[in-house]
């Protein structure tokens, strides 16, 4: 699952860069949705087994929700 770990790390890093560079709230939320869908589609088209795909997609959902929380916290603290 090394490929997935790299994909996940890139996803997380991209959103954290957006947060740290003060990307607009709506834009960073949209980026989180977009990258999440991209990662899901990438996994769906991969050669992982169906069981692995489902497990990875659950993990991606947790990542998305965690990043959503970081985004919300960042903007709550800016006000």
Image (spheres, rainbow, N blue to C red):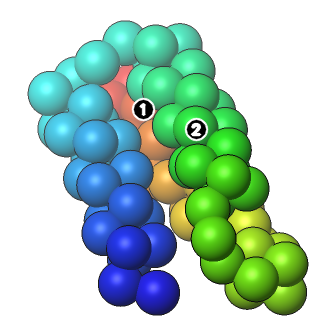
Is residue 12 in sight in this rendering? no
Q: Residue at x 38, y 61 (%)?
A: 7
Vertical arrangement, residue 42 with respect to residue 21, above or below: below
Q: Residue at x 76, y 83 (%)?
A: 49
Pinpoint residue 43: horizontal percent, then vertical percent.
63, 59
> In this figure, which residue is indicated by the disc labeled 2?
38
> In this figure, which residue is indicated by the disc labeled 1?
75
Apparent side of residue 9 relative to residue 66 in the rendered image (left or right): left
Q: Residue at x 84, y 78 (%)?
A: 50
Q: Nearer the viewer, residue 4 or 28?
A: 4
Task: Using the rendered view, name the quadrant where residue 17 is placed.
Answer: top left
The numbered dot on residue 6 is: none
Placement of the C terminus among the 4 image quadrants:
top left
Secondary-structure class at tag 1: helix
Q: How many marks?
A: 2
Q: How packed is label 1: few (under 14 Cα within 10 Å), some, or many (20 or more)? A: few
Pinpoint residue 19: horizontal percent, then vertical percent.
28, 36
Apparent side of residue 7 relative to residue 23 in the rendered image (left or right): right
Of the two numbered discs 2 and 1 in the rendering, the one whose residue sits closer to the viewer: 2
Pinpoint residue 1: horizontal percent, then vertical percent.
46, 87
Apparent side of residue 16 relative to residue 43 in the rendered image (left or right): left
- Give the farthest residue toward the left: 21
| Alpha-carbon span between mark 2 and mark 1 | 25 Å
Task: Using the rendered view, name the quadrant where residue 57 is placed.
Answer: bottom right
Secondary-structure class at tag 2: helix
Q: Earlier in the sequence, mark 2 or mark 1?
A: 2
Vertical arrangement, residue 34 with respect to residue 51, above or below: above
Q: Residue at x 31, y 69 (%)?
A: 6
Pinpoint residue 10: horizontal percent, then vertical percent.
29, 55
Is residue 15 in sight in this rendering? yes
């Amino acid at each position: 699952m090394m490929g997935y770990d790299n994909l996940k790390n890139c996803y997380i890093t991209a959103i954290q860069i957006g947060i740290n560079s003060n990307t607009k709230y709506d834009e960073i939320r949209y980026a989180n949705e977009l990258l999440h869908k991209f990662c899901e589609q990438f996994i769906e088209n991969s050669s992982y087994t169906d069981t692995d795909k489902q497990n990875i997609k659950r993990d991606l959902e947790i990542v998305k929700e965690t990043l959503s929380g970081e985004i919300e916290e960042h903007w709550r603290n800016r006000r």
